[in-house]
Amino acid sequence: MRQALRYVLLFFVSLVLFSAFFILPAVGESSGYLIASPSSPPSGSASVVVHLTEEDFAAHPALHDLVVEGKKVRRPTPLFFLPPPGDDWSAIVLRGDEEQALWWTYMFVQEGNDAHMPVFLQYNGTYYRLAPSQG
């Protein structure tokens, strides 16, 4: 009886550890990656254009990899589920706060009346839009 109780206890401890390392991080964080795709210049006044500078790239190294290098940057994800690195992947994996900073500075800006305006990035005469992708 004691042996069976030990096995049951070991099973539950293993289940809790598995959940802590694999399932809970996946629920709390996003997956996929960010890309910067070339875009046509914005038309109308319902958008914002950000002219990227070296200060932007210094403050957000992932932005350099996205726009200048044309690489995919991984969004926050559990370590165990990262896709294999390749030539088109950045070595940077965003943290949650860094993703939020990119999202609300370089993807959208929030107006006072809860409206969200898209952001177009301009660098070396080309316009870009940052976008999240799954996969």
Image: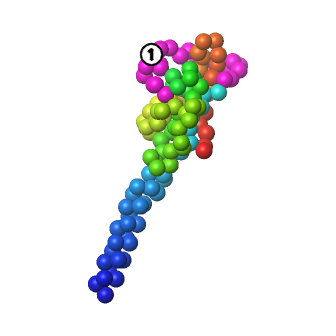
Image point (51%, 22%), residue name: 64
Q: Examine the image and state in which quarter residue 42 appears.
A: top right
Residue 22 at least partly seen: yes
Quadrant including the C terminus: top right
The extreme bottom residue here reads 1
Residue situated in front as seen by the camera: 119 or 69 = 69
Q: Nearer the viewer, residue 77 or 45?
A: 77
Location of mark 1 (residue): 55
Instruction: Check disc 1 and give the amino acid type.
Output: Glu
| Residue at (39, 57) in percent of width and height | 20
Is 103 drawn above or below residue 16 in the view shown? above
Q: Position of residue 90 (x, y in %)?
A: 52, 31
Residue 92 drawn at (x, y percent): 47, 33
Q: Quadrant of the N terminus?
A: bottom left
Left or right: 103, with 95 as reference point: right
Residue at the spot 64% in from the left edge and 12% down from the top edge? 125
Image position, residue 40 (x, y; %): 71, 20
Q: Which quadrant would residue 51 be assigned to in this image?
A: top right
- Report the span colored magenta: 38-62
Q: Is residue 64 magenta?
A: no
Q: How many numbered discs, if any?
A: 1
- Dot 1 lies on which element? helix
Q: Position of residue 22 (x, y in %)?
A: 45, 56
Picture quadrant where residue 9 is located: bottom left
Question: Is 93 situated above or below 53?
Answer: below
Left or right: 40 with respect to 13?
right
